[in-house]
Amino acid sequence: AQTVTQSQPEMSVQEAETVTLSCTYDTSESNYYLFWYKQPPSRQMILVIRQEAYKQQNATENRFSVNFQKAAKSFSLKISDSQLGDTAMYFCAFMKPGGSNYKLTFGKGTLLTVNP
Amino acid sequence: GAGVSQSPSNKVTEKGKDVELRCDPISGHTALYWYRQSLGQGLEFLIYFQGNSAPDKSGLPSDRFSAERTGGSVSTLTIQRTQQEDSAVYLCASSLWAVEAFFGQGTRLTVV
């Protein structure tokens, strides 16, 4: 079974600064997907960024980028130029594609607060 | 609709009562998931529907929990004889290509 660990329950950053959220995972699979989801107070989970394990290049989406270290099973999220609207819970998630279920396995989340 | 819709948004029920939570997925999405988010916990997989295939119920925590999906669209999660430990946010998600899931805003269930 896969496990996802987020070791930082809470983090804070000043507006306009950069912050990195950590995530490690455990799997014996070689082909999988990793995700970062954002959950603001509205409760709706929003996909921030996705990484395919077979791709060596780190995914980027505007101010969001990841540092994917497959051998170390590490998948950190970097948020540049932090904005007040980035304040939310951030969840790291793992998915093994194929088979009969594409379920996501989530970490317990990191509460990020962006301070003005 | 434009997104995944869940109802009700909040539900308070008495211990021992049955509750039904509804999910309207994005039109045309073949896959539908239910997750549970308990206080201070991550999201826990409950059940997965894909097209006309038999659902994967491996995440349901007890036989008090059941779910159905009618016509390959709307899904209902039913919790019978609710207990206080069932209090949580129940999130529904749907996807077309199975990899990217779109979530609803969830139903916050409080059992008193």
Image: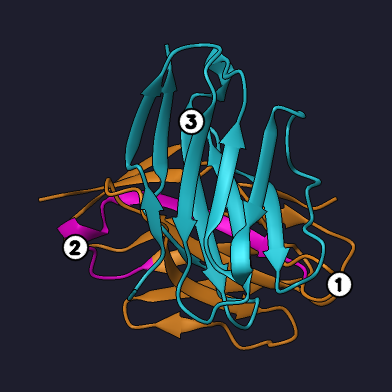
Chain colours: A orange, B cyan
Find numbered disc 2 in the image and state the secondary structure of the residue it sits on.
loop
Query: Can you give x and y, in whole percent of width and height, for residue B89 in the image?
Result: 45, 37
Q: Is residue A72 highlighted in magenta?
A: no
Q: At 44% from the left edge and 13% from the top edge, which residue is drawn?
A: B14
Chain letter of mark 2 equals A
Horizontal side of A42 relative to A2 (left or right) equals left
Horizontal side of B33 relative to B10 (left or right) equals right
Horizontal side of A85 relative to B49 (left or right) equals left
What amino acid does circle 2 point to?
Gln
> Farthest residue toward the left?
A116
Quarter of the picture containing the N terminus of chain B is bottom left
Mark number, residue B88: 3
Find numbered disc 1 in the image and state the secondary structure of the residue it sits on.
loop
Question: Which residue has dot 1 on it?
Answer: A99
Query: Can you give x and y, in whole percent of width and height, for residue A58 in the image?
Result: 56, 82
Q: CA distance from mark 1 to mark 2?
A: 39 Å
Query: Can you give x and y, in whole percent of width and height, for residue B24 in the image?
Result: 45, 62
Mark positioned earlier in the residue sequence (1 or 2): 2
Q: Is residue A92 highlighted in magenta?
A: yes
Say yes or no: labels 3 and 1 on the same chain: no
Q: CA distance from mark 3 to mark 2?
A: 29 Å
Q: Is residue B39 visible?
A: no
Q: Nearer the viewer, mark 1 or mark 2?
A: 1
Residue extent of the magenta highlight: A79-96
Chain letter of mark 3 equals B
